[in-house]
Amino acid sequence: MKSSQIFFTITKQVNYGEAVYIVFNFTNWNLQHAIRMECKKIDQWSKEIEITCFQFEYKYVIGQYDNILEGEIVWENGPNRSSENLKLLEMNQSKLQFEDVWEKRNLMFFLIDKKQNKRSKKNEEHQILIFGQVKALNSPVKFSNCQLNQKTQLYYVNLQFEPEEITNPIEIQIYMQVQLNKSYIEIISKNVKINFRNQPINICEEILPDSKCYHLK
C-alpha cells in the first residue's frame, strides 16, 4: 500500500510539562501508540507522519510531555476528525497538510471547473464568495483557486467552525461572478442549510441549484 507523508498542525496552549499528541482510529485509539507533536512556535504544535491508509480518523489529546500514560489526559471534544479532505488536498498541494485548531472543525467547500472551450489556452477565472451566519463568516470569504491541469481548475475554501456551530444546520449562501468569453454572469444562490459533515461540500450539487442568474453588461 502506498504511504503518504502528512503534515499535521494544531493550535493549542498547554500547561508547562504537557504536550499535544495525535491518536488514530487505525491504532484503535490506543494511547500507547499516540504520537507526540513538536512545539516549534508558541501554541503551535506540528508533526509530519507517514500514513499508509487514505481513509482514517484522528483526534488530539493533551498529556504529560514525557509519558502520556502518566498523569491527567484530556481528549478534545467534538466528533472525530476525518481524512475525507485528502483527495482535494492532494490535488491542490504538493505537500499534504491538515491545519487544525483545538476542538474546532474544518469544513471544505469546493467547485471544480473544467474547460469547455478547446481553443482557449486557460480557464477564465471566476470570483466566488461565501456568506453565512457563523463566526468564520463574519465577513464574506473568497474562494482560493489553483490550476490542477490544463483543463481543470479547483476553487475551494476551508472554514473553521466552533464546536457549538457544528451541532446545528449551518446557513450558507454563495455569490459567483462567472466570466464566459468577454461577458459576465452573476449567480446568487438561495440561503441553504447544510449539516456539518467530515466530507467536502460540492457547491454545484448542494448550494447552487435553483440559484438566480443575471447577465452583466
Image: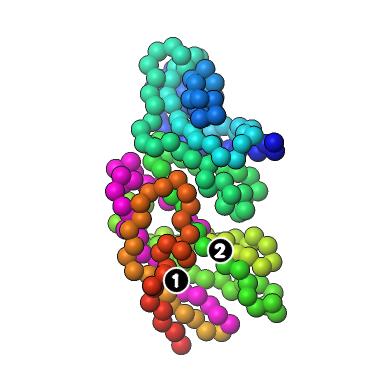
Q: Quadrant of residue 80?
A: top left
Residue drawn at 56 percent across, 71 percent down: 125
SS class, disc 2 = strand
Point out residue 12 in the picture as x, y percentages from the top left corner. Answer: 42, 33
In primary-sequence order, the first of circles 1 and 2 is: 2
Q: Position of residue 31 (x, y in %)?
A: 49, 20
Residue type, mark 1 in image: Met
Q: Residue at x 31, y 52 (%)?
A: 169
The numbered mark at residue 176 is 1
Q: Quadrant of residue 46?
A: top right
| Residue 188 image offset from top left, x and y in percent | 38, 72
The answer to which of 182 and 16 lies nearer the viewer is 182
**Mark 1 neighbour density, 10 Å: few (under 14) some (14–19) many (20 or more):** many
Q: Which residue is mark 2?
A: 112
Q: Mark 2 Cα within 10 Å, few/some/many (few <14, many 20+)?
A: some
Q: In front here: 26 or 117?
A: 26
- Residue most toward the bottom? 217
The answer to whether residue 175 is visible is no
Foreground of the two, 155 or 28: 28
| Screen quadrant of the N terminus | top right
- The residue lying at 63 percent from left, 75 percent from top is 116
Q: Height in image: 158 above or below 8?
A: below
Residue 164 colored in magenta in the image: yes
Which SS type dominates the magenta stretch?
strand
The residue range painted magenta reads 156-181
